[in-house]
């Protein structure tokens, strides 16, 4: 269970501060990764249900309670991965009848404004339908224009969810067969029978679903835009990522651990192997 903190200030010329929690201490990110990789991955008492999940929640709360925030800090945004968190915090799943617990209880008791944003990736996120624009898209051929980056909003009752779509690495590739999904449809296959033209999905996009289980004093749409910008303008990378930067760095450190794949205290296989650069 890895936690990464990103401290953002109001000065646009001041770089953000990154920290990682390991062995009871918040360290500079590079030092935290080094310390994490030097020790065992996980703890045997941790799990994804029952007492094991309770121990993980205690670990998370202890980490958040020990986080040293700047004196002017009034609010904190916790960003969690749906598949990784819903077994630890059932309220972060899709069952609306589960009302708690949520992470960050100690921060709330300290008077901070705490919001929680949840992301879902890959097969756990819906695939967007095409929105056609009059005068731009070819409605006769049902051929949409390709949108490289767009944030959809979907309202259902009093709740709104967002879907960030980004062009995939296949579409960004320099070779023309990787870009055929932009201008070709299934009806065009008889015109281009080259096997390589069938290698990639048509109109391939990566997708990230964003929901806000607890908004605090934020406008949920502002949180969705914040998450989308941290994916599309990655703070710690020269490219966009599927996960906002804190989750991206935690995910990368976990996968790079020498013991990754040999330790599974929860007894469940990880079925969410999603590349972090938008392979569609």
Image (cartoon, helix red, strand yellow):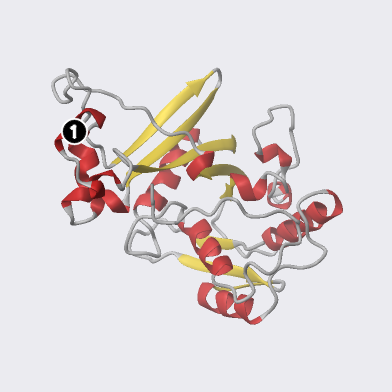
Circle 1 residues within 10 Å: few <14, some 14–19, many ≥20: few
Residue in the image at 31% along x and 46% along y: 200
* Nearer to us in this view, 190 or 153: 190
Mark yes or no: residue 214 visible: no
Q: Mark 1 — residue? A: 190
Q: Does 71 appear above or below 126?
A: below
Residue 224: percent from left, percent from top? 45, 39
Residue in the image at 50% along x and 67% along y: 18
Q: Does 58 appear above or below 116?
A: below
Q: Quadrant of residue 259?
A: bottom right
Q: Does 134 appear above or below 43?
A: above
Residue in the image at 73% along x and 27% along y: 97
Mark yes or no: residue 258 visible: yes
Residue 164: percent from left, percent from top? 40, 40
Image position of 204 (left or right of 24): left
Which residue is the extreme one toward the right?
A: 51
* Nearer to us in this view, 217 or 230: 230
Q: Quadrant of residue 45?
A: bottom right
Q: Quadrant of the N terminus?
A: bottom right
Residue 88: percent from left, percent from top? 73, 48
* Nearer to us in this view, 36 or 173: 173
Which residue is the extreme one toward the bottom?
A: 38
Secondary structure category for the residue under label 1 = helix
Image position of 248 (left or right of 15): right
Image position of 197 (left or right of 164): left
Count numbered badges in the picture. Answer: 1
Residue 254: percent from left, percent from top? 58, 66
């Amino acid at each position: 269970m890895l936690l990464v903190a990103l401290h953002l200030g109001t000065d646009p010329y001041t770089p953000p501060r990154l920290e990682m929690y390991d062995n009871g201490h918040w360290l500079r990110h590079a030092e935290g990764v080094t310390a994490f990789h030097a020790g065992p991955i996980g703890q045997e008492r941790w799990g994804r249900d029952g007492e094991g999940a309770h121990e993980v929640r205690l670990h998370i709360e202890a980490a958040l309670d020990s986080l040293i925030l700047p004196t002017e800090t009034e609010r904190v945004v916790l960003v969690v991965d749906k598949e990784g968190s819903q077994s630890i915090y059932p309220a972060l799943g899709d069952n609306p009848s589960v009302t708690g617990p949520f992470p960050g209880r100690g921060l709330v008791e300290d008077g901070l404004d705490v919001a929680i944003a949840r992301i879902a990736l890959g097969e756990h996120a819906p695939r967007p339908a095409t929105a056609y624009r009059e005068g731009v898209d070819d409605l006769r051929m049902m051929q949409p224009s390709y949108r490289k980056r767009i944030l959809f909003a979907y309202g259902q009752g009093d709740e709104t969810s967002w879907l960030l779509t980004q062009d995939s690495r296949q579409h960004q590739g320099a070779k023309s067969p990787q870009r055929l999904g932009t201008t070709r449809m299934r009806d065009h296959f008889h015109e281009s029978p080259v096997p390589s033209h069938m290698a990639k999905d048509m109109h391939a996009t990566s997708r990230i679903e964003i929901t806000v289980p607890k908004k605090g004093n934020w406008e949920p749409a502002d949180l969705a835009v914040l998450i989308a910008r941290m994916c599309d303008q990655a703070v710690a990378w020269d490219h966009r990522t599927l996960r906002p930067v804190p989750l991206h760095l935690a995910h990368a450190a976990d996968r790079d651990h020498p013991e990754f794949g040999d330790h599974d205290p929860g007894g469940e296989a990880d079925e969410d192997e999603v590349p972090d650069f938008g392979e569609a």
